[in-house]
Amino acid sequence: MSWKKVVGLGVAICIAGTTFLTGCTSSEGGNTSVENMEFPLKESVTLTYWMPLNASVSKNHSNMNDTKLYQELEKRTGVKMEFQHPPLGQEKEQFNLMVASNELPDIYEYDMLLYQGGAQKALDDEIIIPLNELMEQYAPNLTAVLKQNPEWDKNVKTDDGTYFTFPFIRGDDRLRVYAGAMLRQDWLDDLGLSVPETISDWETVLTAFKEQKGATNPLSFELKKFKLYNIVAGAYGVANDMFLDDDGTVQFGPMMPAYKEYLTTLKRWYDKGLLDRDFATSDGAAVTSKITTGKAGATVGGSGGNLGNYMNLMKNQDSKFNLMPAPYPTLHQGERPKFGQIDPASGQNAFISPMCKQPELAVKYLDYGYSEEGHMLFNFGIEGQSYTMQDGKPVYTQEISNHPAGWGFAESLTQYARASSNGAFVQDYDYIEQYCSLPQQQAAINVWSDTDAKKHAMPPATPTTEESQRYAQLMADIDTYCEEMYLKFILGSESLDNFDTYVQHIKEMGIEEAIKIQQEAVGRYNQR
Amino acid sequence: MKQAISFGQAVPRQKKPRLLRELAKNKYIYIMLVPFLLFYIIFMYGPMYGAMIAFKDFTPKLGILGSPWVGIKHFEAFFGSIYFWRLLRNTISISLQTLVFGFPAPIILALLLNEVRQAWFKKTVQTISYMPHFISLVVVCGIIKIFTGSEGIINDFMVQFGQERRDLLLDPALFQPIYVISDIWQKIGWESIIYLAALSSVDQELYEAARIDGAGKWRQLLSVTLPCILPTIVVMLILRVGSMMNIGFEKIILLYNGNTYETADVISSYVYRKGIQEFSYSFSTAVGLFNSVINFFLVLSANTISKKVNDTSLW
Amino acid sequence: MIKRSVGERIFEIINIIILTLLGLIALYPLWHVLMASISSGDGLARHTGAMFVPAGFSLKAYRLVLETPMVLKGYGNTLYILVFGLALSMTMTILGAFALSRKGLYGRKVILLFIIFTMYFSGGMIPFYFTVKNVGLADTRWALIVPTCVNTFNFIIMRTGFEAIPVSLEESAKIDGANDFVVLWKIILPLAKPIIAVIVLYYAVGIWNSWFNAMLFLRNRELYPLQLVLREILIQNDTAAMTMGGGDADTGMLNEVLKYATICVATIPILVIYPFLQKYFAKGVMVGAVKG
């Protein structure tokens, strides 16, 4: 492709942009010509960047430009970024206002799943620009990364092959898994039991916890997490939501016959007092207090916020306290778990808006994150300051791992790098090893990722605008009904004999249409 | 007070006063009204066109005026929901209970406070009783959960009577009582402030006169205190009736669970859940409009009745 | 001194007992928050049930909240909005309430209906944003003052209060040749002190607690009012625990305490305002004035 063509495209996009331009946010004057776009730029150019501020950053800074990371990036690229940050928790409102009032910045990071109709709609609405041609010319690093990893590539384009985002990529499967079940290893040792693997093992262990360890609510969890990760449901080969069965067909777990067995087990556990009596209403704080006071011996959660947090809390209280990760339970000994928590390998992160006057520059800027130097910068920061190389491996310095002012790891890391949140780059496994440093956490990554969850999780397909609206409409009522019946079956206010009536009712609410929508979207996804 | 009202009515009204003459007569009054009305025109009526998105499929990109019309699609979706009647029933039921029990509570508190002679005690109780209003709902609901949980203080008490420990929030029959009682607990002090202010305006000489007539405490309450604060009570009641359909979703979603949906799920919590999945401004605007129409109708009726019965009204 | 009967005495004792109980029940949530906020992180996490004394003792959470640079700026911004907002709100509401409390004012009923209508129907967030932007207030602190300066509920209460003042008093002033502004200033306002105190309280608390409009209208983080800053602190700790498999184990245990400390920092200053206004609720304000 010739230079002229590229410039022409850029101009065309800009003209498209100006049709609804009220206040342009791009750089004033001094348009760097495309020819001498070599980093660092000779004359500095300003672009605008809308980015929800990461929680660990906002503790200490009100602007990304205050971080060492972006100061360094500005030095290296010569691009001056003017950041705009919405208030935490109000990203959606402010984003919709920006769109409605045509005040889009040049670059923005947003969860397009929150935009009604998703990424395809955003392209149709012309609030993000397609990147195919620009990427070919100005994003050699990202293009190379995607070419080498078809699985990543598949997630970041639409059904017709349009690229539209600079993705956040989890560079290792073990980075995709961070949650599962955990229980008191020290209790198991006392009781002479081994880590439970099957549902009946679990029942034995929980009973022993209750009878011999005085745990009044042996298994305590936040219901949301318990259902999301399909902890017990997975053993029965069903999920609590849509999933792919072994043939790759979309199924809705709560209406399958195996779901009745799953509910029967939970009901038995509840009746026997193995489940937390308050499980339907417990929040994180309630679970924490039950785990740390020995009222519960097992729970469900993440390796940082739950496992690491509980270990830290008990460090000085009870030196024997030892929570260990447990594998996702199965029905029979030796089976490989079908389900588990797993995040998509690559996801949407940064977009370029049609208002950007220099999309080539924006593309080149964002592509830097996928280059060799960019990779190190976004994952580890600046060599000599935030990390040093030891035996060919980057190791965080004391300033990160043991901050002089007592900052947490994430808090000090976000000054230099974005590895602990997200961004337009490939996340490095070496980061998590140092971030989750407890032996229990290290074990957790391996134990929890030993599942077939990848095969059964719903892929990030892109239903069309009409499809996603219809789907949401159907599922709003169906989800409410399923949630309601789920608890009623377990608590016994509805007999499980009525399971068939319940399934019939779900069908009447239009579940088959919803499944069909997902099936078609997945079909198109697989065709990519 | 009664006097004042009847006096007001006695002001002779011209049958069809000419606008100009009125303007001249009350020119200062109308000058006062100018900034006030400008505010309402600009900031309240200016954005009012936005209500039309209830009849449109709103897309931010197209804007309010540019989004396509879809007629009453969103209303149909709401009325057609299998949960519509349950939502309406719960909304009305919770509203009525908070009205019946929650409305008189702050009045009673104000009257009790009014009888206290020790000024320091009165002030202390007043100050303390309005504090729960300031504690955010998340925390209040957290405290409710602590109290009603299976290890909570209420269970500690019930165990003494041979009851088994259980999570009270799992019981559909208890959800509404828990909601209403905690609501009163949180608002009683704050809402009593307005009545305390009204009480402080009661002419003390009326009590003297009543005492001379040999009226006891109870008699004084019925024939002096209540009539004097009646206009305030009535105005508050009308406003309260006019917000029957508004039950905040926050407290509901913090306290309910699948097992109690049948008594706990209300219109606002339903819209909230649906909003999370659909991101639809149009749908929530449509439901909001439905609520507003009912509320407005209620306030009109309440006002008319009140005007007929005791001469107090909002307009 | 009037003699009190036995019945009255018994009533008084029961009354005081009831009110004491009520006060204790009402005090509990604040006490709970206060005790939790000075607990230590691990102490609070391991705590179960009701809270009467702190679980462990630590002021670390307060230090963290108050050391957040935005908090101090937030206090400043809120104070600015409070002072100017209160002045504007009170002026507008008093003028409107006084004018519309005049009986027989031509067009009164229509205007009142016109105003009350807005309690029930509104255009929603997006058109409201455009209006404020077009008026040129966006991204200034005045965007948090002007567009919400009259609250219809407060206006109605104020008007009810004004209407309760006997007309006879103004009549005499009018005869003396005073115009309406003088009547308002010299006669109505002094007599309506209790109701004005209530409305000051309502507006002040409303302004103090508001954050949503700041989210809508402010892009410059330096202008954030306190509540928005504190909300971010609350949310950031919730989200930190959700992202990336539960974020940071180190700060995890402090999160709960931080939540309570934040609430205290946000609440206690405004709680203090009430005792100052209480004196206007003292009995017998009208005595003397009404005699005429």
Image (cartoon, coloured by chain):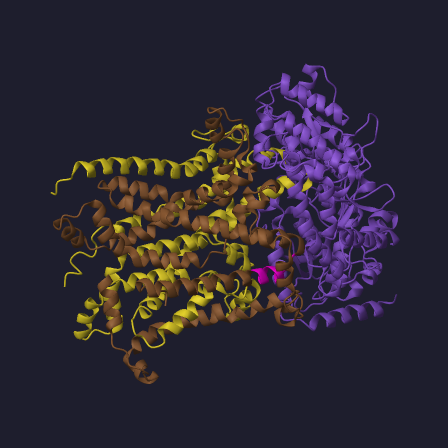
Chain colours: A purple, B brown, C yellow
Q: How many marks?
A: 0
**Residue at position x 67%, y 15% in the image:** A190
Give coordinates of residue C40: x percent, y percent.
50, 30
Q: Magenta-highlighted stretch: main secondary structure? A: helix
The segment highlighted magenta reads B279-287
Q: Looking at the rendering, in which quadrant would you find the C terminus of chain A? A: bottom right
In depth, the one of C134 and B196 nearer the eye is: B196
Q: Is residue A19 left or right of residue C89?
A: right
Q: Is residue C247 visible?
A: no
Task: Give the answer, above or below, for where A516 lies relative to C103.
Answer: above
Q: Looking at the rendering, in which quadrant would you find the N terminus of chain A? A: bottom right
Give coordinates of residue C263: x percent, y percent.
47, 42
In depth, the one of B125 and C59 nearer the eye is: B125
- The quarter of the displayed image where residue C265 is located: top left
Task: Give the answer, above or below, for where A358 lies relative to B260.
Answer: below
Give coordinates of residue C241: x percent, y percent.
62, 39
Q: Is residue B125 visible?
A: yes
Q: Is residue C105 left or right of residue A517?
A: left
* Residue B225 on the magenta segment: no
* Residue B285 on the magenta segment: yes
Give coordinates of residue C29: x percent, y percent.
43, 38
Q: Is residue A448 left or right of residue B309?
A: right
**Residue at position x 81%, y 71% in the image:** A8
- The quarter of the displayed image where residue A258 is located: top right
